[in-house]
Amino acid sequence: MAEALLAGLLQSGAVKSSNIWATDVSQDRLNFLKKKYQVYIGTDNTEAVKWATVIILAVKPQVLPHVLSQVKKGLKRTQLVISIAAGVPLSKIIGGLSSSASVIRAMPNTPCLVQQGATALTTGKTVTQDQLQMAEAIFEASGKVVVVEETLMDAVTGLSGSGPAYVYVMIEALADGGVRMGLPRHIAQTLATQTVLGTANLVSVSGEHPGLLKDRVTSPGGTTIAGLHELEKGGVRAIFMTAVEAATKRSQELGS
């Protein structure tokens, strides 16, 4: 996720590589990022924080407390901290820094890598409007941004945070269906991928309810209704809803 965000920022031109300092515990990983993106690299989080205006914590929830202890040493009151650690509430992040720290929680997803991400933000009490706008600009460079109450962040994680994996499975399954019916694999995957991409874009651009758009391509007694009938028999709607619910609950567990 960190690399997806990094790539999105650079590809959009919103931030120059000379204005990004990436830290990691793995020197091999840092060398890779340096070679591919020409960013500054290092292993000292405290020094990186002293240099930065915005600090993005792109780490797993279980290592966040350790990272916060390092960030706290170099943190200044005017700096903005953005965390993308899944499930970790603002109270824990602020508790690991200071009560005056300006903290935003973000839940982006991996399509940020191709500037088609979906990110939800929620803000701490000390975050200014200018800081929120700065955070929005950072993530808008990689896709669309919404601002929500913190109580909704676990649901965001279950939907758009984990959602790309659900869509990958759907694309793979559609392609497999095409192969089963005789299409060459590369053609089936191209058709499946473009179908999902084009359909999502049509929903976004039209602003219409997906159910209405579905009805427009479903002729009486036709091929589409035959396929939809099989999907309904398999409980496809319930399966997707249950997947979002399960991922949301896991996010809640990680934050507890």
Image (cartoon, rainbow, N blue to C red):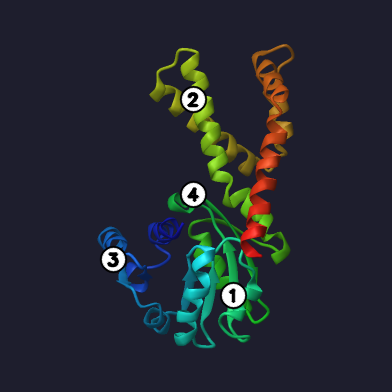
**Residue bearing the label numbered 1:** 93
Residue 69 point in image, percent of width and height: 49, 80
Tell whether label 4 touches label 1 (CB within 8 Å). no
**Residue bearing the label numbered 2:** 175
Q: Residue at x 50, y 50 (%)?
A: 116
Q: Earlier in the sequence, mark 1 or mark 4?
A: 1
Q: Earlier in the sequence, mark 4 or mark 3?
A: 3
How packed is label 2: few (under 14 Cα within 10 Å), some, or many (20 or more)? many
**Residue bearing the label numbered 4:** 111
Tell whether label 3 touches label 4 (CB within 8 Å). no
Camera-side mark, 1 or 4: 1
Q: Earlier in the sequence, mark 3 or mark 2?
A: 3
Q: Which image quadrant for residue 132?
A: bottom right
**Residue bearing the label numbered 3:** 27
Task: Reply above or below: 187 against 146.
Answer: above
Q: Earlier in the sequence, mark 4 or mark 2?
A: 4
How packed is label 1: few (under 14 Cα within 10 Å), some, or many (20 or more)? many
- Mark 3: which amino acid? Gln
- Mark 2: which amino acid? Ala
